[in-house]
């Protein structure tokens, strides 16, 4: 049994609709496929060489770059050897690659991005040069200076081989990158697995995994201030105080009104992000 792409039927249709805050252009084409048997399977027709591939093939349509989002084959009632395959192309899609490889486990993901923020205490402002955040008596204010730092969050999904186990997927959740990844420094990316599902995509056994990656410029580390209600003397004796003091790295007390140092602790395990494409 074999199928052959005969050509594209003349004439096409298109439409424009609103999707959220965007305008989406959709275009339709009809392909003619010939088979050498009357009872050809639909899957065989969809696999005809030269037919577009859903979520892979793209064209330059009137409304911009369109990706194939659907194929609908119908057998000609008058000639069972002839099939008409209606295709739908849209500027709104979850296209993941420009590759012609139909295997979804090879596709490079596209992503959507958003910006979130987190609070951070700072002790110098944004002047040039920076000014210490102190009052006229060169003392700390009762309340610290808190700013909102940006975190860029990327949401995407990718198809992976079915050999990846559920436990392996779970172990990727809440981890940070152990080395530089795609230009982002080590420990600046935090990975979250938001869900996954197993099944077949266009005949390929695979697992679709939804990810969220958050980029934090100052690294995903716990950085408490090196301060406390006690300090060590040069001889190692611990002295308790009734107010918080800033500490040196050896535990001795800094001078009054000194800028506190920060310590670094890892609250997320580090892994290689090599499985991300």
Image: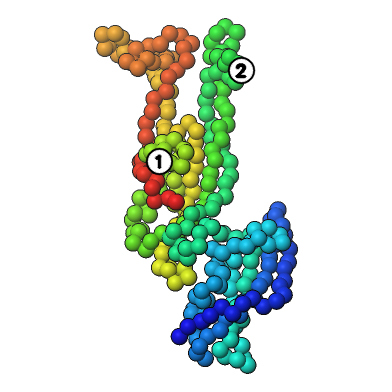
Nearer-N-terminus badge (1/2): 2
Q: Can I make out residue 28 in this image?
A: yes
Secondary structure of residue under mark 2: loop
Q: Residue at x 54, y 63 (%)?
A: 56
- Residue 274, compared with residue 184, is above or below; it is below
Q: Residue furthest bottom?
A: 78
Q: Residue at x 72, y 61 (%)?
A: 62
Cα–Cα gap, marks 1 and 2: 33 Å
Q: Nearer the viewer, residue 112 or 167?
A: 112
Q: Nearer the viewer, residue 204 or 62?
A: 62
- The residue identified by callout 1 is 177
Q: How is the image coloured?
A: rainbow
What is the number of the mark on residue 127?
Answer: 2
Q: Residue furthest left?
A: 235
| Quadrant of the rendering where the N terminus is positioned | bottom left
Q: Residue at x 40, y 68 (%)?
A: 205
- Residue 105, compared with residue 141, is above or below; it is below
Q: Can I make out residue 19 in this image?
A: no
Dot 1, how many residues are within 10 Å of its Cα: few (below 14), some (14-19), or many (20+)?
many
Picture coordinates of residue 242, whole percent (x, y): 41, 14
Q: Nearer the viewer, residue 187 or 240?
A: 187
Picture coordinates of residue 208, whole percent (x, y): 45, 60
Secondary structure of residue under mark 1: strand
Picture coordinates of residue 95, whole percent (x, y): 56, 59
Left of 42 or right of it: where is 20? right
Which image quarter: residue 19?
bottom right
């Amino acid at each position: 049994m074999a199928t052959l792409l005969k050509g594209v039927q003349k004439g096409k249709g298109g439409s424009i609709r609103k999707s959220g805050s965007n305008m989406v252009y959709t275009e339709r084409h009809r392909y003619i496929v010939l088979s050498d048997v009357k009872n050809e399977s639909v899957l065989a027709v969809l696999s005809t060489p030269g037919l577009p591939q859903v979520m892979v093939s793209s064209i330059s349509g009137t409304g911009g770059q369109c990706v194939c989002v659907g194929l609908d084959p119908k057998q000609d009632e008058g000639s069972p050897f002839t099939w008409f395959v209606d295709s739908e192309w849209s500027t709104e899609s979850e296209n993941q690659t420009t590759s012609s490889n139909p295997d979804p486990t090879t596709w490079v993901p596209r992503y959507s991005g958003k910006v979130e923020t987190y609070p951070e205490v700072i002790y110098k402002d944004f002047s040039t040069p920076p000014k210490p955040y102190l009052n006229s008596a060169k003392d700390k204010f009762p309340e610290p200076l808190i700013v909102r730092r940006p975190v860029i969050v990327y949401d995407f999904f990718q198809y992976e081989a079915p050999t990846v186990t559920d436990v392996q997927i779970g172990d990727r959740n809440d981890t940070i990158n152990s080395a530089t990844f795609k230009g982002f420094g080590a420990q600046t990316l935090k990975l979250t697995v938001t869900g996954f599902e197993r099944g077949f995509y266009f005949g390929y056994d695979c697992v679709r995994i939804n990810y969220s990656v958050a980029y934090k410029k100052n690294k995903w580390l716990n950085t408490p201030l090196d301060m406390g209600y006690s300090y060590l003397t040069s001889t190692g004796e611990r002295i308790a105080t009734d107010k918080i003091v800033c500490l040196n790295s050896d535990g001795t007390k800094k001078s009054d009104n000194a800028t506190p140092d920060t310590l670094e602790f890892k609250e997320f395990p580090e892994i290689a992000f090599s499985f991300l494409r």
